[in-house]
Image (spheres, rainbow, N blue to C red):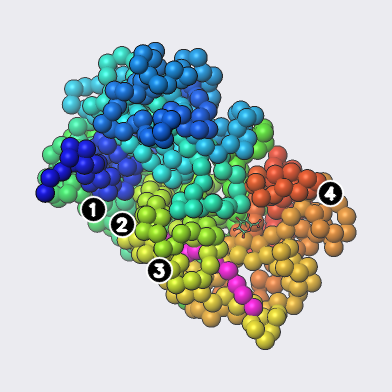
Amino acid sequence: MMFTARFKLFLVFFLILTSNFGANVFAKTQDINGLDSFNRYKISLNGQWRYIVDPYENGFYNYRWQKFDDQEYPSKNAFFTDSKVKSKSELLEYDFDEASTIKVPSDWNTQDERLYFYEGTVWYRKEFNKPEQTAGDRLVLRFGAVNYRADVYLNGKKLGVHLGGFTPFFFDITDAVKAGINSLVVKVDNKRGADEVPTLNTDWWNYGGITRDVDLIPLPKQFIQHYQSTLDSVKTKSFDVKVKLSGSQIQDTDVVMAIPELNLVVKATTDKEGVASFNTNLPEFTPWSPTNPKLYDIKFSTEFDELKDTIGLRTIETKDKDILLNGEKIFLKGVSLHEEYAVDGGGRVKNAEQARYLLNKVKELNANYVRLAHYPHSESAVRIAEELGLLVWSEIPVYWTINWTNEATYKKAEQQLTEMIVRDRNRAAVVIWSIANETPVTESRTVFLSRLAKEAEGLDGSRLISAAMEKHYDQEDENLAIVSDPLSDIVDIVSFNQYIGWYEGLSKKLERTRWHIPYNKPVIISEFGAGAVQGMHGDKTERWTEEFQAEVYDKTFKMLDAIDGWSGVSPWILMDFRSPRRIHGKFQKDFNRKGLMSPVGEKKKAFDSVKLFYNKVSD
Ligand code: GCB
């Protein structure tokens, strides 16, 4: 068969594109995906970047709507090369040097008034100097998160594309980087799409931009890509760790694992995949728990590399209707949280301080648990939760309706799940991976979610899997709420959201409702709530008042208490948050008002209802 050069090139790209879980890349990245980098030496590319707003994607398509960035024609496209070279270009309008600057990491919506509602393309450029490196070493470019699609170019060469707004991705730029000044260009596009994850409809702000850190990470020629540790039992203290090496000559290499505080130093040798497996019985240790979130330093070293981390040692499992932490029953006293910090008019959380502010508010509720909704929050947030002793529910944005029958959509969800799990699977705080929120009960959806559950189980069999489901009512008894969903057979915890007293009836209904949940599994109420404008007072029957909200809370807790197997709750939500669906001119003004606090952190009455209830309930 005869193939044209163009088709051959397409085939090559297609094969490369389909062989990665991470970014779709034109550079080699398989062995850097999921790179454990939190504690590595990094050169930050955060700061001011040049930006060009491009609603018609002029920089991407010509006037015939043909792509400029076709790999066959990189030289034609001055835009992606040096911004000063404008000759022959069809893109004379573009000049990064004359463009304004925008902060990275951050959303663009709260930095430029024109972009408050914007959904489309913005071009970003950062120039950086090639770092000093030893010959043979590698240089990796890491993005913490870009919402939603990132097309990344270095010195005019396309490195690849990444889809998904909340997880990290990597490029090996060892060969693409040049001596002196380098030009890094990112086309960021936050347009929603019917086949994307999430899809067109959500109840949160679609913040666009490079929303998390950008770093250069120098690596030796042989390096530790990542590791996975599991404590099998607090009693036996059996501890399994797998360490994956990448780069050159990864077989038959010694890896040393040390936990200095436990006087533990053990050695293992890598197999032909570069994996060193440790199975060891730990000496006496203090288990990690919300009441004592003890963390230990852990270090892996090889002849060429060293990776440091801190870990908590704990187990999580279910037994019949109970959740067991370190073998003991625990009740999850939590709250749901969006990754939004509007205190200074801002939007998406941009740094660890803001994440810590929010998680400290969670702690003020006497909580031991937080639902990080509805997408993976930053790695820093998860680590701060771990430090503060908060158990974490972590989820991917498979939300409401998704194109369940489209394989490409499934792959996008699976990629986000993989990137989330690989990033956080050594965090003791994370106890639940959630694969979906309020999805319709259809066969195609259950097939889709079963595949995701299986994937999660394969990547990390040591945590619980859940999804926020929904309830319905008995046909003959309008006061009998039922949770019956085939997904319940697949997940470890039966979780569901319900809004009796707000979307359904008034608080009286909470007094009448009984529950039928026919599974021998723990039950978590992943959401309930009511809207209130902070500072608005009135009778408890008056919607939008703090009194109304507090009444819904008090009665809901009473109702839930009667559920057999009730093992946890994360009311919706800690703080009011922006949503384009919340357009009521008097009460909402672009904010979902179900927060226990206003967007700037002023408490409503219901905050105290939760605090009081959690004070009374034993863990
Ligand atoms: C839900 C969704 C959540 C919404 C909330 C609401 O069930 O899971 O994302 O924000 O209801 O306020 O309606």
The amino acid at mark 3 is Val
Ligand 1 is within 8 Å of the C-beta of the residue at disc 1? no
Residue topped by disc 3: 447
Crowding around mark 3 (Cα neighbors within 10 Å: few <14, some 14 to 19, many 20+) is some
Residue topped by disc 4: 536
For the question of whether residue 244 can be seen, the reply is no
Q: Nearer the viewer, mark 1 or mark 4?
A: 4
Q: Residue 217 in the image: state x and y as whole percent.
A: 33, 30
The amino acid at mark 1 is Phe
Q: Earlier in the sequence, mark 3 or mark 2?
A: 2
- Per the model, the C-alpha gap separating discs 1 and 4 is 58 Å
- Per the model, the C-alpha gap separating discs 3 and 2 is 34 Å
Ligand 1 is within 8 Å of the C-beta of the residue at disc 3? no
Q: Earlier in the sequence, mark 4 or mark 2?
A: 2
| Quadrant in the picture for the C terminus | bottom right
Q: What kind of element bears circle 2?
A: strand
CB atoms of marks 2 and 1 within 8 Å: yes
Residue at the location (48% across, 71% down)?
A: 442
Q: What kind of element bears circle 3?
A: helix
Residue topped by disc 2: 239
